Image (spheres, rainbow, N blue to C red):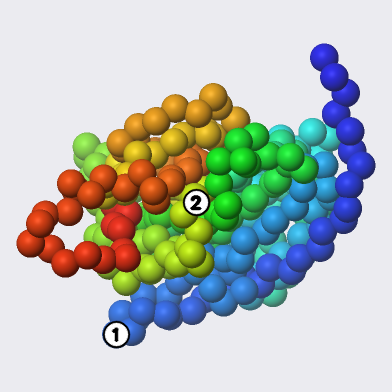
Amino acid sequence: MSAITTEGATISQTLIIDTIMPYSPSQKPIVAVNYNFPGPSIEAYENDTLVIRVINKLAQPTTVHWHGIFQIGTPDMDGAVGATQCAIPSSGEMTYRFRAYPAGTAWYHGHYLDQYADGLIGPLIIRRRVEPNQEQYDTERVLTVSDWYNDVARTKLLSWYLSKNNTKGIEPIPDAIVVNGKFSQSLFVKTSGATRIRFRIINAAAFSMYTVSIDGLPLHIIELDQTPVVPYTVSSFMINAAQRVSFYVNLNEFDQNFVPPDVPPTKSIYIRFKS
């Protein structure tokens, strides 16, 4: 068994947790990170030290959990309220310091009650100096998919779910799907002319499992939950809540027969998330 090295750079970042209302005319507040939903991507190389200052501007407590990080020697940095730490109070702050390990597609989310269902999510990408299969793609994109509820989870969904009238324990069904903070019809992923693209898919949903596919293209799977895998090809795959899947596509493999002859040529290809 090889030793784990701890050498690396120190990466510092500040996350401000506050509410926004980005979807007019909806008056639903989003628990945002740095006033964005999802929050900013945190990126580091494996064995770097992450120093993340979290400032809580919410009216209620909060914590942030670093999903996929082993926290070897730093269990108090895991962000699980009531298990590894007390919650960060309103108007308070906490600095998390931990090693970026293991490499792969991770993410962060709120871990106080149901805050991540209301928007407290973001990507956490831990890179290797030499990525497995990196010769297969020229660029990459991160897609964070999540549930959308018209009601606020904290004040309505949770109370409904725990109500004595919900005798069967039925979980609330989401009203829509949101990808990178956009409702699916309004999201455009630009590839900047590249034909070989890696996609890192993060299922940040509280409830839903999704089937992912791209019209006319095979998907070459290369990573499952931060674990590199021998590449294999599928036409679609399912991803459950909190899971991550990386795949690459080659636009030169596009099946021209997929487009009906009466449809004019297009430079756009549809990525589908089916709940």
Type of amino acid at the residue the image marks with label 2: Ile
* Residue 25: mark in rendering: 1
Instruction: Pinpoint residue 210: horizontal percent, then vertical percent.
Output: 32, 44
Comparing 203 with 165, the one in front is 203
| Cα–Cα span, label 2 and label 1 | 35 Å
Name the mark nearer the viewer: 2 or 1.
2
Comparing 62 with 213, the one in front is 213
User: How many numbered dots are placed on residues in this image?
Assistant: 2
Instruction: Pinpoint residue 207: horizontal percent, then vertical percent.
Output: 35, 46
* Rendered view: 4 above or below 152: above
Residue at image coords 27%, 39%: 169
* Rendered view: 132 above or below 273: above
| In-image side of 181 versus 265 (left or right) | right
Comparing 28 with 14, the one in front is 14
Type of amino acid at the residue the image marks with label 1: Pro
Instruction: Pinpoint residue 209: horizontal percent, then vertical percent.
Output: 33, 41
Which residue sits furthest right?
A: 7
Q: Secondary structure at mark 2?
A: strand
| Screen quadrant of the N terminus | top right
Residue identified by numbered label 2: 197
